[in-house]
Image: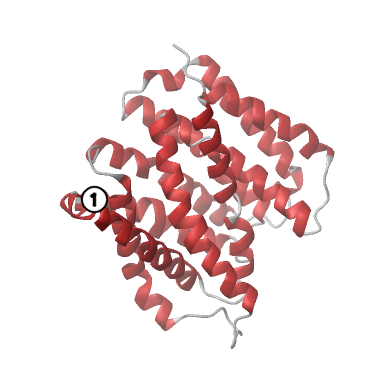
C-alpha cells in the first residue's frame, strides 16, 4: 500500500469508526428515520454544491439506476438496519464484528463480479482471516452471549452485504462518473426516502426534548461520518482497489472499541492488547497486491 493509500486507510478507519459511538448517543433521543434523514440531508447539503461545481451532478443523474442501487444498498437499507439493531437489540461490539464481515463478501464480489483475480490470493485471504481473528479478540467472547437476537444478527449481516455490493455496482455501471456526483445524488435520494417517516416519527419513544449531545451527534454523523467519510472512501478505492478498500471495516471496529475504552468507561482487556496487532497485521497482508 502506498503512503497515500495508508493515510486514506487510517482516515477512513477513524471517520467510519466513530459512527457507532454517535449513533448510540443519537438513538437515545431520535428515531432511526430521523437519524438517517439528518445524515443524508446534511451530507447532500455539503456535497451537492460541490458536485454541481465539478459538473458531476448531471452525469450522475444520467446513471440514475446505479445511483439508486447505491443509495438503497449503501445507505437506505443498511443504516436503518444498523440504527434499529443498536437500539437495544445487540451490543456495539457485536455490531462492529458483524460489519467486519464486509471484506469477505467484497473479496467474492471483486473476484466474480469485477474480475479482480488478485483479491483471492492466499496472502490476501490469510490477511482477512488474521484481521477477523483480531476483531473477535477486540470485541470479546461476551459479545456472543449477551442477549443474542438472531433476527438482528441477520439484519447486521444483510447490512454488511449491502455495504459490499454497493461500491461494486457503481464501479461496474458508472465508472466514468465522478463519485462526488453519485454520492451527492444518493444522499439526496435517501433523504427523500426517509423524509416522511422522520416527520411522522421524529423522536425516540418517551422523548419530548432531545438533548444537546444528540443534536451534536446528528451533525457529526452527517458532516463527518457521511459526507467526508464517503469522499475519503472512494479516494481509497481509487488508490488501493475496491476489494482491499473494504478492509477499513477492521479499522472501524478497532476505533469503535477504543472509543468505548476512552469515553465509555469500558475496560481495556488482554484480548484487545492481542487483537489490535492482529488487526494491523491482517490489514497489511490483505491490502497488499500479491501477483
Residue lying farthest to the front in this orientation: 53
Please state if 150 lies on the left or on the right of 137 as rendered: left
Residue lying farthest to the bottom in this orientation: 208
In the displayed structure, 95 sits above or below 45; it is above
Frontmost residue, 4 versus 244: 4
Residue at position x 42%, y 31% from top?
239
Residue linked to disc 1: 56
> Which quadrant of the structure image shows residue 189?
bottom left
In the displayed structure, 2 sits above or below 76; it is above
Residue at position x 55%, y 41% from top?
249
Residue at position x 37%, y 70% from top?
194
State the image coordinates of residue 15 (x, y, percent, origin top left): 56, 50
State the image coordinates of residue 256 (x, y, percent, origin top left): 66, 50
Please state if 55 lies on the left or on the right of 14 as rendered: left
Frontmost residue, 59 versus 167: 59
> Which quadrant of the structure image shows residue 30?
bottom right
State the image coordinates of residue 106 (x, y, percent, origin top left): 43, 34
State the image coordinates of residue 286 (x, y, percent, origin top left): 54, 24
Q: Secondary structure at mark 1?
A: loop
Determine if residue 73 is in view: yes
Frontmost residue, 34 versus 141: 34
In the displayed structure, 112 sits above or below 75; it is above
In the displayed structure, 50 sits above or below 119; it is below
Task: Please state, as top left, top right, bottom left or bottom right, where the C terminus lies in the image.
Answer: top left
Amino acid at each position: 500500500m502506498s503512503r497515500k493509500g495508508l493515510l486514506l486507510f487510517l482516515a477512513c478507519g477513524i471517520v467510519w469508526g466513530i459512527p457507532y459511538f454517535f449513533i448510540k448517543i443519537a438513538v437515545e433521543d431520535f428515531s432511526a428515520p430521523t437519524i438517517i434523514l439528518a445524515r443524508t440531508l446534511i451530507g447532500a447539503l455539503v456535497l451537492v454544491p460541490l458536485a454541481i461545481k465539478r459538473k458531476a451532478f448531471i452525469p450522475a443523474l444520467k446513471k440514475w439506476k446505479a445511483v439508486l442501487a447505491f443509495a438503497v444498498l449503501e445507505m437506505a437499507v443498511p443504516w436503518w438496519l444498523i440504527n434499529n439493531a443498536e437500539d437495544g437489540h445487540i451490543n456495539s461490539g457485536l455490531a462492529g464484528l458483524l460489519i467486519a464481515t464486509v471484506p469477505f463478501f467484497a473479496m467474492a464480489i471483486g473476484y466474480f463480479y469485477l474480475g479482480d483475480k488478485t483479491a483471492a490470493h492466499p496472502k490476501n485471504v490469510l490477511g482477512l482471516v488474521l484481521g477477523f481473528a483480531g476483531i473477535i479478540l477486540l470485541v470479546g467472547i461476551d459479545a456472543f452471549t449477551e442477549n443474542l437476537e438472531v433476527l438482528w444478527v441477520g439484519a447486521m449481516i444483510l447490512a454488511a452485504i449491502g455495504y459490499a455490493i454497493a461500491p461494486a455496482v457503481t464501479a461496474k455501471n458508472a465508472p466514468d462518473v465522478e463519485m462526488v456526483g453519485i454520492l451527492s445524488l444518493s444522499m439526496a435520494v435517501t433523504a427523500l426516502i426517509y423524509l416522511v417517516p422522520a416527520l411522522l416519527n421524529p423522536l425516540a419513544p418517551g422523548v419530548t426534548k432531545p438533548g444537546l449531545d444528540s443534536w451534536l451527534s446528528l451533525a457529526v454523523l452527517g458532516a463527518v461520518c457521511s459526507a467526508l467519510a464517503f469522499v475519503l472512501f472512494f479516494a481509497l478505492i481509487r488508490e488501493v482497489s475496491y476489494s482491499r478498500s473494504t478492509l477499513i471495516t477492521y479499522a472501524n471496529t478497532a476505533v469503535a472499541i477504543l472509543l468505548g475504552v476512552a469515553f465509555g468507561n469500558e475496560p481495556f482487556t488482554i484480548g484487545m492488547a492481542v487483537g489490535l496487532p492482529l488487526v494491523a497485521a491482517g490489514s497489511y497482508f490483505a491490502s497488499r497486491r500479491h501477483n
